[in-house]
Amino acid sequence: MISDPMNIVPVILSGGSGTRLWPVSKPERPKQLLPLTADETMLQLTAVRTRGFDAASISRPILVSNAAHADIIDEQLQQSNIDDYSVILEPIGRNTAPAIALAALEAQPSDALLVMPSDHVIDDLPAFHDAITRALPLVAQGWLITFGIEPDGPETGYGYIQMGQACGDLVNEVVRFVEKPDVANAERMLAEGNHAWNAGIFLFRADAYLAALERHQPDMMAAVRASMTQAKRDGPHIFPDAMAFHACPSDSVDYAIMERETQVACVPVAMGWSDVGSWDSLHAVSTRCTDENAVRGDALLLGARNCLVHSDGPRVTLVDVDDLIVVVSQGEVMILKRGESQKVRKVTEALKALAAATSSH
């Protein structure tokens, strides 16, 4: 056991492009950089998520982001009164395992990395802080911790974590990670009760993570280390060497590390979490007004029920319709049925194909 108090470094992963929230979220300004659920952007909400946590010291955050978003990130962090931070600007996306490795090399070996996606909602911060506190004793011993969301339904859009015997205060060993299931398997896991949704939030010592990476993904470790050894620095910005990082294999932390290690534990927690991965999930976490409608922007709703309206300018008027999602953004208008918002991916694919066909003529 380590007697010194743990030092926690928030590691904020901000590399996603958020295409499922098109047309509001676009590669040049993806959903984490937008104020979708509050006046603050999702990145800003994530960056202040450890404020008020007093069970360990909190160091300056390390962000890992797309190089194209450097200026926007600087602006948003300064608006949130965060002046001391580092941003590692990836020359190319290589998924979460290398992104976390970049941050782990920038941190001190004994630092506990609190890895958080930049585009999630957590409404109950005291519950999140309590879960972190419960994880710390195992983190000090070199365990890799994942936070599992207590499921409230047979959701098929998330991976699941099967939990085994207790290894701490409301902490359980991980038996296995389960791919996104079909409805029947999701219902079975819900009935069994020892499963949680995989939120993609982690806590582990930097040296424990890098040691696991060296064991299971030596090529990835070598490429990331080379890219950081040759990195250029400019104020808070760190630019990993592009040639070295391009050589890095692409893989998620779940596949590359968590599924292969033995000392992996899960802290199940109910904390008002959502990954806001679709317009439907945004409707679910939004404040709703009359007749279960959620509105952001100018809208007139007459006899409409269970609708989501999101407009950046023109007034949207709905009359006697139910269960619609209406989005007006940057000159684009999209209308679809509630419950069908995963089909936005089809829209972005069709637009890509259209742009490719147009440019070839």
Image (cartoon, rainbow, N blue to C red):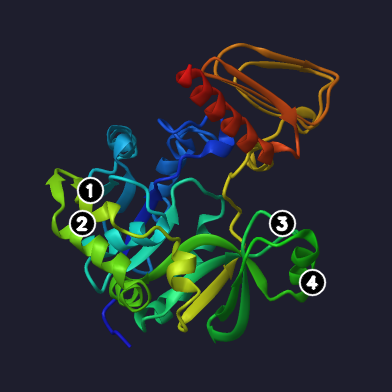
Residue at 22% from the left image edge and 60% from the top image edge: 106
Residue 155 is labelled as 3
Q: How far apart in space, not on screen, are marks 4 and 1 (Cα)? A: 48 Å
Q: Earlier in the sequence, mark 3 or mark 4?
A: 3
Tags 4 and 2 in contact by the CB under 8 Å rule?
no
Tell me which amino acid carries mark 4.
Ala
Numbered marks: total? 4
Left or right of 346? Residue 47 is left
Element carrying mark 1? helix
Tell me which amino acid carries mark 2.
Ser
Q: How far apart in space, not on screen, are marks 2 and 1 (Cα)? A: 7 Å
Tags 4 and 1 in contact by the CB under 8 Å rule?
no
Circle 4 residue: 191
Measured along the vertical axis of the image, is residue 129 above or below residue 69? below
Picture quarter containing residue 155?
Answer: bottom right
Element carrying mark 3? loop
Rendered-image quadrant of the N terminus: bottom left
Q: How far apart in space, not on screen, are marks 1 and 3 (Cα)? A: 38 Å
Foreground of the two, 119 or 255: 255
Tags 2 and 1 in contact by the CB under 8 Å rule?
yes
**Mark in front: 1 vs 3:** 1
Measured along the vertical axis of the image, is residue 67 above or below residue 357? below
**Crowd rating for badge 1 (residues with CA inside 10 Å; few <14, some 14–19, many 20+):** some
Residue at 43% from the left image edge and 52% from the top image edge: 49
Residue at 29% from the left image edge and 52% from the top image edge: 246
Q: Earlier in the sequence, mark 2 or mark 3?
A: 3
**Crowd rating for badge 2 (residues with CA inside 10 Å; few <14, some 14–19, many 20+):** many
